[in-house]
Image (cartoon, rainbow, N blue to C red):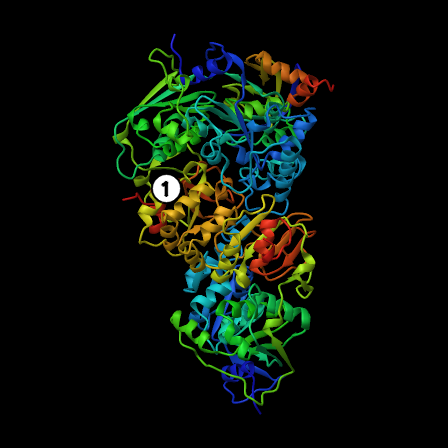
Amino acid sequence: MGKTIIEKIIKNNTGIDAKPGDIVTVNVDRVMIHDIFIPFVASKFEEMGFKKLWDPDKVVLIYDHLVPASQVDDTRHFKVGNEFAEKYGMKNVHRSDGICHQLMTEALYVKPGNIVFGTDSHTTTYGCVGAFSSGIGYTEMASILGTGTMWVKVPETIKVSITGKLPDNVMAKDIILKLIGDLGADGATYKALEFTGDTVENMTVASRMSMSNMAIEAGAKCALFTPDEKTAEYCEIELDDKQKDLVGDADAVYCREICYKAEDFVPVMACPSNVDHVEPVKDIEGKEIDQVFIGSCTNGRLEDLMAAASILKGKHVASFVKLIVTPASRKIYRQADENGTLKILADAGAMITHPSCGLCCGRTGGILTDGEVVVATNNRNFLGRMGTSKVEIYLASPKTAAACAIAGKIVTPQ
Amino acid sequence: MGMTIAEKIIAAAAGVSEVKPGDIHTVELDRLMSNDGTTHLTIDMYNKLKNPHIADVDKLVWIVDHNVPCDSVKTAASHKKMRDFAKKNGIKFYEGEGVCHQVMMEKHVTSGELIFGADSHTCAYGAVGAFGTGVGCTDYLYAMVTGHSWLLVPETLRFNLTGKLQEGVYARDLILTIIGKIGANGANYMAMEFGGEGLHTLNMSDRISICNLCVEAGAKTALMEVDDIALDYLKEHGREPKHVFKSDDDANYAKVYDIDLSTIKPIVAKPHFVDSVVDAKECVGTHIDEAFLGSCNNGRIEDLRAGAQIIKGKKVNPMVRFLVVPASADVYRQALDEGIIDTFMEAGAIVMNPNCSVCWGSCQGVIGENEVLISTGTRNFKGRAGHKDSFVYLASAATVTASAIKGEIATADMV
Amino acid sequence: MDKFSGKIWVLGDDIDTDIIIPTEYLALKTVDDMKPYAFSPLRPELAGQISEGDIIVAGKNFGCGSSREQAPEIIKALGIKCVIAKSFARIFFRNSFNNGLLLIENEDLHDVVSEGDNITVHVNNYIEHQEKKYPIAELPQNLVDIVNAGGLVKAMRKLNGLD
């Protein structure tokens, strides 16, 4: 019988022909821990009685949520992280290079077919290169650090096919928001998403990343794309036979299949305060806004900044509206500097911050107050996510966000 | 009887022909700057007035620079209050354009003006011969409502500069040396006036840096003689001088200091006082956790160039957080054009958007318990940069950058 | 833990981890420091009202959002005996069991209860509310093992020969 991508990855990892619902123990290829949780991982690891890491080279520690520190106790996380890395011989530590999920793929820690866990829900991102990756808590992370293994329940798979050419000014973000709206915030809970069709085949790895990143907002355990030549180039590898075979078989069993025609997509927004509350931008046009945020592991990549710049070039942000741009990594920042994108954004009045999670994690980078409205390219618009519970957060693509910044209100990008 | 520059500006603002130290005069103000540190308090007081109004809205400039982008729900509320008030009343408003004093220098201040700023480092405006002084929000509010205020005419300390700074020595080393010499209250209530041949060897960035820090000696204001360099600066920025004053030959000074610039050495101000100044070499080897290149004192293009030149092709020590924060959006764009931003990013620095950063220890970049910062900021008071038990050393852009590379306090010749 | 009773607090659908504990408070040193801010964006007074042994009954997708394990830890620290919801987000689900917080899925209970009601939970069997029984599923063996060990930390300590 045929297999879905996730079933193949699990088979390759464990040798077991597992089917959805089975519980299997997998060997972990890589783990990621970020600054917020490192103190908790470190204390749980020692409390568990481990004396060494199962494989220090497979552990990546990334400071991003607290960079730069905005509260006096934040730097304690760096201190604990540095001590832990030193004590257990970890070399893969990034202290100010960007957002964890961007770095995991960009710095080549993840390969197609890998099984990766991270102490962050958006770890689903690495499905963009065909890796099974998922978020876990710090206690489970501590146990992986000691054992190199973790139990998982093999998920059922929802297949999403998208065919055709996307209209102008529609981005991958609009697709994933539409999908989340259709599935609901728990529509893929415990399940894997598998993307297929010529629309996603024609997408850049960066666009795929925006989609796999947000799969968790429908509750998904992981979100997978078939690795192809673009993936190989991005990961700086030649695909081996097993990696090439990471495609859903024709006779694989899916719990649900969803088909979209690319031409049907329009720019959309997730409205307050749920990611699945998705509406076409044209239906909410005219609402006045106070701030725009372009960044995050969802939409802080070079193509996102360039898309925003294409709208903002020669224009200026509306008066009394702030535009905050937070590139997803140091490398992206430098590329955007090199190709003139940062200059265009700065000339348009953007505040360009150091690469980090910034406003997305709600600790700094543009916190808002009662009655304020923000259009943001990140992944969550939950109550209180960016300030008080009376802040309205609209999630959108970088193009839509840029257009709103110029207009000072919600508008469809033209 | 002759008058000093400060006396002449006050006399002009008071509409009298002569003033002398100790006199109190009612003066007309040219400009009123306020930032997000205290403007929300001013607004609260304004709203309690019986008959609130603004004397001349064109004189007001409001700047959000301390916590930008906003980093807490508390500051978000005070920013909104400030933004809404500015919008409603048509007040010139900047947010994210840079540190207030730098923005004022780039866009508003001209020589001979009398300016109140609700921030102690307003004395920076003396670099173009403007009388800038810091006030609290009550004084600010009175001036905002009436357009004038009262001012006690200060005595003046005169600094005659001769010679030229040596290679690798900066204006910041000079002013910290002066503060170390006269003490943190050495110029209390006084004006510090700079002139002499040596002044002409200092560029505008140097001059802003010097005047900006005079409040750390307690000065009410700092003033420099306006020369061609200052006039060119105003011209480049599209402004005409209001008055160009020089001190009279028979002006009366409380004290005159002669400073030979060539004798100045790289220095460091040790925790927790700005006047705790020592030769930088004495601090070499001190462990640091963070380094900061920025602020209204030292975040201009010249300062970034000095740092970039040292760090080019080298790396920030991985255990040090090196914050590089251009003082304004104009400085940032210039630095982008010159490839300086990339030099810092390549080296591993944290390049932030223009703001006050850790110089104002309640926003991004704060340091934790027992941590040590070396900074180009304005102050090293206890707790200034974050945790109450932390340590701040002040030094020049060059010394700060060299220290970021070494992971401990180092001078530029050591890297 | 076969059977227990408690007073219930009723919450809606999609109670996300930013509601359970906002990011602003995540770098506080201990779970006890964070505890007062639990549920604050939605019901700021709730954390102070919960007593030891109370039960939360919620709608679908409880715990969606971030991987922050403080979410179940805080709920446990507030004294909540178990959370009953129509469904749970998966990371929250794993985190809860790893910390010894019992979760029970039930489709119907949420629609009939009112805040302040008393219910009785018969673990792995049914929930009783106003003399009506609502059946619940048995937990999978691997979760039972973790719970029996007293949480994942204790299970690992056993593995390392410590307890």
Name the residue located 51 percent from the left edge and 25 percent from the top edge: A116
Task: Give the residue type that dot 1 points to.
Answer: Pro
Foreground pick, B194 / C95:
B194
Location of residue C17 with respect to B164 vertically, above or below: above
Left or right of C86, for residue A4: left
Q: Quadrant of residue B255?
A: bottom right
Spot occupied by residue A287 in the image (x, y as percentages of width and height): 36, 46
Circle 1 residue: A398
Residue found at the very far right of the displayed protein: C163
Location of residue A83 with respect to A215 vertically, above or below: below
Left or right of A118, for residue B393: right
Mark 1 element type: helix
Foreground pick, B135 / B340:
B340
Quadrant location of the C terminus of chain A in the rendered image: top left
Name the residue located 46 percent from the left edge and 48 percent from the top edge: A371
Spot occupied by residue B59 in the image (x, y as percentages of width and height): 45, 71
Foreground pick, B413 / B84:
B413
Spot occupied by residue B307 in the image (x, y as percentages of width and height): 52, 56
Parent chain of label 1 = A
Location of residue C4 with respect to A332 vertically, above or below: above
Name the residue located 56 percent from the left edge and 22 percent from the top edge: C94
